[in-house]
Image (cartoon, helix red, strand yellow):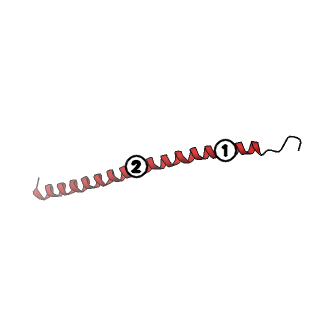
Amino acid sequence: MSEDRLIDIETKLAYQEDLIESLNQIVSDQQRQIRELETACRKMVDRLVDLSEAFAATQVEDAPPPHY
């Protein structure tokens, strides 16, 4: 194997290692964002359930008497 070919292979390997590291960082950042979004979504769902229950309770209290 010629020296130029070996240098070319080593150069390509270095670029691939850099690309893999960059992609790994991107995937890690995306996973962190997904966890944050899931947490925010759970909080919104819990809040919506609480508001829905509170709204349902006020509807029963504000209902007109049966003789109307």
Q: Number of marks in the image?
A: 2
Instruction: Tell whether 1 sits left or right of 47.
Output: left
Q: Locate residue 36, reporting x and y percent.
A: 45, 49
Q: Residues within 10 Å of mark 1 (few under 14, many from 20)?
A: few
At 10% from the left and 57% from the top, the residue drawn is: 3
Instruction: Tell whether 27 sits left or right of 18.
Output: right
Instruction: Tell whether 16 sits left or right of 10.
Output: right
Instruction: Tell whether 39 sits left or right of 24.
Output: right
Q: Which residue is mark 2?
A: 32
Seen from the viewer's position, the closer of residues 12 and 44 is 44
Q: Which residue is mark 1?
A: 54
At 89% from the left and 41% from the top, the residue drawn is: 67
Q: Amino acid at mark 2?
A: Arg
Seen from the viewer's position, the closer of residues 14 and 34 is 34
Tell me the SS state at disc 1.
Answer: helix
Q: Locate residue 32, reporting x and y percent.
A: 40, 49
> Which disc, if any, is residue 63?
none
- Quadrant location of the C terminus in the rendered image: top right
Q: Residues within 10 Å of mark 2 (few under 14, many from 20)?
A: few
Tell me the SS state at disc 2.
Answer: helix
Judged from this view, the residue extending furthest toward the right is 67
Residue 4 image-quadrant placement: bottom left
Alpha carbon of mark 2 to alpha carbon of mark 1: how far? Answer: 33 Å
Q: Amino acid at mark 1?
A: Ala
Contact flag, marks 2 and 1 (Cβ < 8 Å):
no
At 74% from the left and 45% from the top, the residue drawn is: 59
At 18% from the left and 54% from the top, the residue drawn is: 9
Judged from this view, the residue extending furthest toward the top is 66
Residue 64 image-quadrant placement: top right
